[in-house]
Amino acid sequence: MSLQNPPTRIPYEAQEWDQLMGLFEKYHIYARHGDYYDRWSYNADLGRDAATLGDALSIELINRFPEEIEKRMGDALPSHFYRGLHEMINVRPNVAVPLWIGGQIRNFGIIEKVERTFKEIWNKLVLEFLHLDFIRSLDSRWNPFDSVDELSLVLKLTRWSSIENFNRAILLIKKRLFRDDNSWAKHAIQEKAFTSREADFIVYGHTHHHEIVPLDAYHRNGKEVYQFMVNTGTWRSCYDLTRYHPEQQKFLPYQVMSYLAFFTDGERHGRHHEAWSGKLV
């Protein structure tokens, strides 16, 4: 977009960068990082520079667990089993991580004795995680069931239950607390740039599925104009829980790469937007 980055950090809000807002106005788009609407990845009270609950979950629990397993078990387990555990960070949704662990245990035929060792390590890490000062600081006293409380409930259930029993419970929790509708369109229609007709394209980038959602149509200067929401999704590997018999703990791996292009009048033969997406399975 003919941008030359300033010598300082790129601002989190587009409004803080006049050059960027000028291009947005020229191309009739408005873009922001989609984590702005993700309570696990963005703390609205502390801002973008603050660590979040999702950061802590990834660093202190999801990343540590396979490392602790490998330290404890060493050569007793095959190397490709460890590689599978290290993919936990890419499991979607994050709450399905225990299902991923259960699936890995079943797929590799891990014996009951070793499974008990896994459970001991997991329980220890969960207890340490829940007692971190950082996690306690995010727990809102005025809200009896905020994100920290939801996560605490899930993690405590993993400590109290066997892996098999917890996997049954997590499917119910996922349905109630973590909806399958991850579309960011509900946020796009509330953006000022959308309601004021300043932007025909509301663009987000976030670690969810690539999507293009029609929002509205209106007339400008006698021409019909379409408004869309576009999410670029993620370029990382994803391991998604299958929708058919999720209790079987099956995950499908894939990678998606999405490219977006926007044009003004006179460019691209009158077209205003192109999206190219490729999937590697």
Image (tube, rainbow, N blue to C red):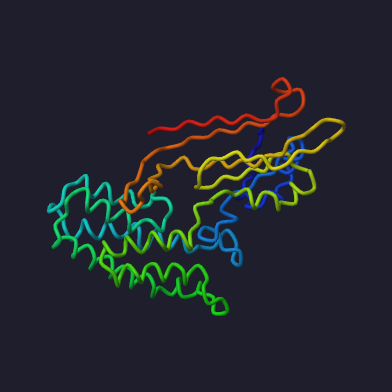
**Please, is residue 133 above or below residue 77 in the view?**
below
Camera sees residue 16:
no
- Quadrant of the frame with the N terminus: top right
Q: Is residue 154 left or right of residue 188?
A: left
Percent position (x, y) of residue 209? 51, 43
Residue appearing at x 35%, y 56% in the figure: 97
Percent position (x, y) of residue 32? 63, 48
Q: Is residue 93 left or right of residue 9?
A: left
Query: Farthest residue toward the top?
Result: 269
- Name the one closer to the observer, 180 or 145: 180
Q: Quadrant of residue 99?
A: bottom left
Q: Quadrant of residue 281?
A: top left
Residue appearing at x 83%, y 30% in the figure: 223
Percent position (x, y) of residue 82? 23, 50
**Please, is residue 163 above or below residue 193 in the view?**
below
Q: Is residue 232 left or right of residue 116?
A: right
Percent position (x, y) of residue 34? 58, 50
